[in-house]
Image (cartoon, grey):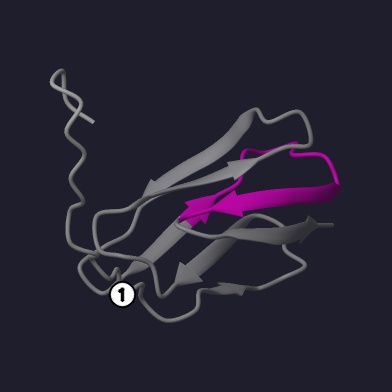
Amino acid sequence: MDAAGTATHSPVRGVVLGGSLALYPNPASGSITLAGATPGMVVRVLDALGRVVATATADSQGTARLVLPAGTAAGVYVVRGGQALRLAIE
């Protein structure tokens, strides 16, 4: 609604998301690969408190290789790259 009280609607726009993401190996230790991301997308591994553990950018093929820091504790983490995926670290 504008200042004169006139309401207008914009056209509906469809959004096509890429296919599903694949995360491997899972469970993991050391490094992981995320396939199916949008090229250039920033992918993050987050711990249970939402802290960033690792970050990578998807290449032109939509693949991101994330190296986990030495000493990353075993547990369940979240990988975010357009979608949220669970990652188990051994």
Pick the front one: 19 or 14: 14
Mark 1 — residue?
16
Q: Residue at position x 17%, y 53% from top?
A: 10
Q: Residue at position x 31%, y 70% from top?
A: 62
Q: Quadrant of residue 31?
A: bottom right
Q: Quadrant of residue 86?
A: bottom right
Q: Residue at position x 61%, y 73% from top?
A: 24
Pick the front one: 38 or 74: 38
Q: Where residue 48 sits in the image (x, y, percent)?
A: 79, 36
For this orientation, the residue located farthest to the top is: 3
Is residue 70 one of those drawn in magenta? yes
Pick the front one: 18 or 28: 18
Q: Residue at position x 62%, y 38% from top?
A: 69
Q: Where residue 38 sits in the image (x, y, percent)?
A: 30, 65
Residue numbers of the magenta segment:
66-81
Left or right of 56 in this view: 53 = right
Pick the front one: 45 or 7: 7
Q: Where residue 82 sits in the image (x, y, percent)?
A: 45, 57
